[in-house]
Amino acid sequence: MKITLAQLDYHIGNIQGNLEKMLRAIETARDQGADLICFSELAVCGYPPRDFLEFSDFIRLCEESVDALRQASRGIGVVVGAPTRNPVVAGKDLYNSAIFLYNGEQIGVQHKALLPTYDIFDEYRYFEPATGFGVIHFKGKKIALTVCEDIWNVGNENPLYTVCPLDEMAGQQPDLILNLSASPFSFSHAHERIHTAQVNVKRYNIPMFYVNCVGAQTDIIFDGGSLVLSADGSVFDEMPYFEECLKVYDLEEVERGGVHQVRAKDKMALIHEALITGIRGYFKKLGFSKAILGLSGGIDSAVVTALAAEALGCENVRVLLLPSQFSTGHSVDDARALAEKLGVRYDIIPIKPMFDAFENTLDPLFEGLPFNVAEENIQARVRGVLLMAMSNKFGHILLNTTNKSEMAVGYGTLYGDMCGGLSVLGDVYKTEVYELANYINRNGEIIPQNSIVKPPSAELRPGQKDTDSLPPYEVLDPLLYQYIECRKGPAELIEMGFEEALVRRVLRMVNINEFKREQAAPVLRVSSKAFGMGRRLPIVGKYLS
Amino acid sequence: MKITLAQLDYHIGNIQGNLEKMLRAIETARDQGADLICFSELAVCGYPPRDFLEFSDFIRLCEESVDALRQASRGIGVVVGAPTRNPVVAGKDLYNSAIFLYNGEQIGVQHKALLPTYDIFDEYRYFEPATGFGVIHFKGKKIALTVCEDIWNVGNENPLYTVCPLDEMAGQQPDLILNLSASPFSFSHAHERIHTAQVNVKRYNIPMFYVNCVGAQTDIIFDGGSLVLSADGSVFDEMPYFEECLKVYDLEEVERGGVHQVRAKDKMALIHEALITGIRGYFKKLGFSKAILGLSGGIDSAVVTALAAEALGCENVRVLLLPSQFSTGHSVDDARALAEKLGVRYDIIPIKPMFDAFENTLDPLFEGLPFNVAEENIQARVRGVLLMAMSNKFGHILLNTTNKSEMAVGYGTLYGDMCGGLSVLGDVYKTEVYELANYINRNGEIIPQNSIVKPPSAELRPGQKDTDSLPPYEVLDPLLYQYIECRKGPAELIEMGFEEALVRRVLRMVNINEFKREQAAPVLRVSSKAFGMGRRLPIVGKYLS
């Protein structure tokens, strides 16, 4: 039996566009001589469709799409993920289903049993879990059809769940496992995915075909890396990351085993590709092509500019250098050097005239009070207004350059440097931004060395340094990681060796700044815990604040 | 038996503060001669605690609080809602529990079975549903202890669920139902709450004591309205809305029946009180006392100013009148009249100098292109910068004045009039804002009549009117209501009589502006479907856009 895996980039809600892409893939698979083609989880509507699922009209469009795929299944099996209606009144209205189509008929369907409802996932908001499990008979083979998370509770060892779908099917002695996934990227996920697939094939002693999607849906990035594993756990093939791929496999060959292709998993290379995929996807799916951002001479905006130029082409990236009276000369030089190196258009706009206009206007109201955060923020906000004016006039999307460390401690100005349609580095700690800069420079200097080595500063006061108000990033970032990613409490952090006063101060900074993150741009997610939908905290919450 | 219901305002995460409040209530109940005092759902930590629940340290603090309540339960039963750990490895880590304490012992616990996971609710993200149900024996009575949603699937008629907890307990012949709730306000919810309570008591033919919390947690407002119902469905008592209340009831009297107190449920009066509660709670829980906002002379900012003055005191509200060259003379007059009527401090700051500074600076970059939305937005953003500068300098929270109709169609400037820490009217349609203005004027004019009767305008272009780019609000709002609250699709809307071209245009406006709402201030929720956590849509989504 020949099986084609279709690792494609879907667009949430673009049901017609997704259908056309799948119909083309079916034709290609037919040409490849495939008996069966497999698309990924909820391929019909894109993942995650969120509250679109609450519109009956949206489900009807999905049903029409499945119907068109059914009609296209003459002579070839088509397995596709789609929402389906729960015919029983009690329980949620929908199932998250894998539908098996062949010769114009629906020959089987398996609903998802394990519904991730944590981090960015809200599946129990919409879906009823499956309680029935059966293999699908196709061309003399028994196929154990599973959807994403259903293979992530091997032998009931995942504490989140109480059922293991493949254990339920094992009595029917399936010949192979087929898994339809929409499994988001994080920099450590490819390892976990292969490990989980291996544990499954070894437990049941049958091969697995695992198909993931690729591309970005706002904040969530899918890396592909679809897998074919032999029964002994060897990786027969791992599809490329961040690329569409349509490939046919011979089941008999897979059964014979052997490692054919495993991909490199360097953390910075993966994050780099993920961010480029994230930028590209956001622009393409919103129908934009051009980006603008403010280039300060610092490391964050330099890295975002380099990423944007690679994602969109240097001709589609425009930068503004927006020096204030506190900007140092080398900042403008470093920014200009980067813009010239990348070949992106830049303009230098000193912000003093606008800043002065605000100062003069506010002078009678500020009653001779000293310069403080109010004036610092005016500078950041004048930059925001200028960038947004350009964005509005010329149809650019403004890229935000705030990194994860700053977002965590609230070191950024709301409606100032926090402006933007997309946060490129909001899930990348400052220490990782340096690593990323070095990675971007791997084949020669793109980011000026000076931007990498100079002490970070917002340049909103004379001689200001980040370390005036924050601990050094080498100390801050590991603490933030333990608190945000690992959810360690103060006692645990102190026991790990972090200084108590620092722990109290940093956790308080994180928690009292929830109101800023609530209004932040969507953050490209590259870690296991990003700011945004995956981390939900009450603004008025009083814990550790 | 005497039962005290404690309808209190908790603060999420302020576990010590909540404990102290409950300990004081226990002493009062003891003085009242109560046998039992009941607090509401998750009273120990406040509702909804969201991802604080993922911190083991947070759960430990909750356990310590329950322990302190246990020690305070000598001679009086104490029923309290708290998260508890699930001792079984399989399934979610926590339960959402009602704990029964008496004489220094925990004499019973009932976990919640029906976990709302829709709209603003995410309970299955954290909690394992109960599968065991038993009554609690206390002083010769058998008490059916339930948590919130557990009484909302009477006889399995709620399609969301597959179990009815009270049906499970009915075989043990309970004498009364006790329900611990944290049931958020919406303007129609008090009716539904009484109806549901009545259906329950009639089905089981026993009285019910239902205790809800009050107060606001960022966007979510709790109205209290705790209930005591006799077995025949008569409302023995309904506690006040939006006020703390501690009241003792004699079970025998309740068993005898009779209606003693039911509250008026006028929609505008309820919304008015809810918004005041929302403003007051947000400031108090964040430790702020002073508000600032921009007063345009239009209806929205006038209503927010009146609400803020009532919530915080006129001495704590400050307004800026920020006329542009396109502002009409009557706008400033109307704004000034309101400020004077309310006795709030106002300053008039023409925005022209800042606007001119931006125009002059951008002139070479805008290359003689015509005035358009870019310049309109600069005006709105200059106002945002001025208001935020005052907020930063003097420690005000900026109140946002955008209404629900504008938020829906994206008629507002990101980082401009969309600035603010809290959106007061973001869940109030424009036509309802007029009703609210008339309600505020019910005992004499506060909002100038001129602000109510003049055609709405953003005044960002000469002679601009909202109806230049939007349908009249009398047409727009019912359509938005059907789409947003009722999730009707285009075919259904057209069938209801809305014009097809209008349906397509409005739905597209709603959907392409998801990126703006993503960065909006938290919205005080007063309807069954508000923008924010309760409505989750993908920014890059292509459905109906």
Image: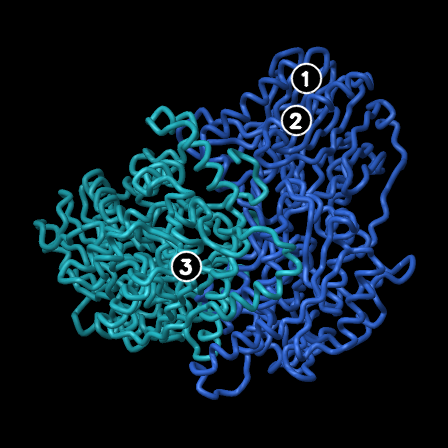
Chain colours: A blue, B cyan
The spot of residue B139 in percent (x, y) is 22, 59
Q: CA distance from mark 3 to mark 1?
A: 72 Å
Counting from the top left corner in percent of width and height, residue B509 is at 47, 41
Q: Which residue is mark 1?
A: A137
Disc 2 chain ID = A
Tell me the quarter of the picture where residue B168 sits: top left
Q: What's under tag 1, amino acid-wise?
A: His
Mark 1 Cα-neighbour bin, 10 Å: few <14, some 14–19, many ≥20: some
Whether residue A209 is situated above or below residue B291 in the rendered picture:
above
Mark 2 lies on residue:
A171
* Residue at x 20%, y 61% (from the top left corner): B3
Front residue (pair B511, B261): B511
Camera-side residue: B85 or A401?
A401
Q: From the image, tell me which residue sits under label 3.
A: B326
Q: Which mark is residue B516?
A: none
Residue A266 in the image, given as x and y percentages of width and height: 83, 53
